[in-house]
Image (cartoon, rainbow, N blue to C red):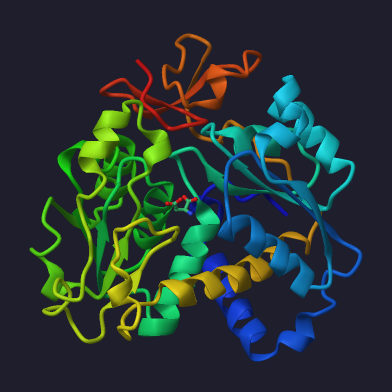
């Protein structure tokens, strides 16, 4: 089976199948309690995490498998300067599957090119976070009974919020899903999501700075944390950190069926007074994340590993002619990597780094 680097690594049929497996796991947990007996999951977390790491580990344990790993860059050989490629080759000797979280965008892709077991991206910098999206989709599906015909408000840090980028990528494949993008202008959705996903897929969207403006039309409100750790300027964070705080008053005019999601951790963007509202689903979302990760591990261990390729058939690439200038891209620290750009719009000369998706210049 392949690696899961972003949500686009999974087809809509595969996502449907994962949700069906997850529903069956919820209904019949005992049926799965030995499904991964003898298999090992490695969790390689170079950045802080509570839910993603522990839910991967709980998922593997609930499947009867076992878990090895580390939870910070300082406790691994990365602190001695080991490359992502070498780390992936080493871990492949110990584990049957690995989940990686890294502060550098594209690190899981580098790992998957060098691993001989499936790699799951548990969040790479401000880029993407596909397994959070699986949790989000299952939550929406369980609460609304559908993934089509929805108006989804996404509020907060749309620039650095990696869960937002993967979620939009997933929602773009369902019918009649409209997104309302609510953020300060400084934290608006990145260009590549706008051009390569929203515009390319013809998705309906509006951008606003007001959380109130579309509140009464939303089926889902997806709140996010302002991502302090990604701000180059700490003063900019201090200025923007309290941009949105959801309170019972703010949702008074919302539909009674609207669901409130949040990938967590919450800082202060949802008042705890909202927690008892039946529309608050963020703790259910945590549970759904574990079951979707169980379904994903099962699926990835079903078949032998197929290594991905940097180059998709039918696409054009520019190699080592320009350099990626994104300081958060894995190419900024791993000097031996080729600078590879995919040409996404030949007419306008637009190409994007295959690791971080930022535009090459
Ligand atoms: N837990 C999510 C992530 O790792 C959301 C967040 O940190 O704000 O991206």
Res 16 seen here:
no
Percent across and percent down for residue 214 are 11, 66
Give coordinates of residue 187: x percent, y percent: 24, 40
In the drawing, does residue 302 fall left or right of residue 207?
right
- Does residue 57 sit above or below 327 in this rendering? below
Work out whether residue 120 or residue 260 is closer to the camera in this orientation and state it.
260
Res. 88 visible in picture: yes
Quarter holding the C terminus?
top left
Q: Give residue 217's position: percent from left, percent from top.
A: 14, 74
Q: Residue at x 72, y 20 (%)?
A: 81
Q: Is residue 140 left or right of residue 107?
A: left
**In the depicted structure, whether residue 12 falls above or below residue 169:** below
Question: Residue 135 in the image: x percent, y percent?
Answer: 50, 67
**Residue located 26% across and 79% down the image:** 258
In the displayed orientation, state which residue is furthest to the top: 321
Q: Is residue 290 left or right of residue 286?
A: right
Identity of the residue drawn at 21% across and 87% down? 256
Q: Is residue 99 left or right of residue 169?
A: right
Depicted 45 relative to depicted 322: above or below: below
Task: State which quadrant residue 141 falls in.
Answer: bottom left
């Amino acid at each position: 089976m392949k690696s899961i680097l972003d949500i686009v690594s999974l087809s809509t049929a595969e996502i449907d199948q994962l949700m069906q497996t997850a529903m069956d796991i919820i209904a019949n947990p005992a049926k799965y309690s030995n499904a991964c007996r003898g298999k090992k999951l490695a969790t390689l977390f170079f950045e802080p995490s509570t839910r993603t790491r522990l839910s991967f580990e709980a998922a593997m344990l609930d499947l009867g498998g076992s878990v090895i790993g580390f939870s910070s860059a300082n406790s691994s050989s990365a602190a001695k300067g080991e490359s992502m490629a070498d780390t992936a080759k080493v871990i492949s000797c110990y584990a049957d599957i690995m989940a990686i979280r890294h502060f550098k965008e594209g690190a899981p892709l580098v790992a998957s090119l060098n691993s001989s077991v499936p790699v799951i991206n548990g969040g790479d910098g401000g880029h993407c976070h596909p397994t959070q999206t699986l949790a989000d989709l299952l939550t929406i599906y369980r609460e609304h009974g559908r993934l089509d015909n929805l108006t989804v408000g996404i509020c907060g840090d749309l620039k650095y919020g990696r869960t937002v980028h993967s979620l939009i990528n997933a929602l773009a494949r369902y019918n009649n899903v409209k997104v309302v993008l609510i953020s300060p202008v400084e934290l608006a959705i990145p260009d590549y999501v706008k051009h390569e996903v929203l515009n390319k897929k013809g998705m309906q969207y509006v951008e606003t700075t007001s959380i109130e403006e579309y509140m009464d039309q939303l089926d889902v409100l997806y709140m996010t944390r302002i991502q302090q750790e990604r701000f180059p300027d700490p003063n900019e964070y201090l200025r923007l950190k309290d941009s949105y705080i959801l309170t019972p008053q703010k949702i008074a005019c919302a539909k009674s069926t609207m669901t409130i999601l949040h990938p967590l951790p919450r800082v202060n963007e949802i008042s705890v007074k909202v927690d008892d509202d039946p529309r608050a689903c963020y703790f259910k979302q945590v549970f759904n994340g574990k079951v979707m990760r169980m379904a994903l591990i099962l699926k990835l261990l079903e078949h032998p590993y197929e290594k991905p390729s940097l180059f998709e058939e039918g696409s054009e690439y520019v190699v080592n002619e320009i350099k990626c200038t994104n300081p958060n891209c894995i190419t900024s620290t791993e000097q031996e990597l080729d600078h590879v750009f995919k040409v996404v719009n030949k007419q306008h000369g637009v190409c994007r780094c295959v690791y971080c998706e930022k535009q090459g210049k």
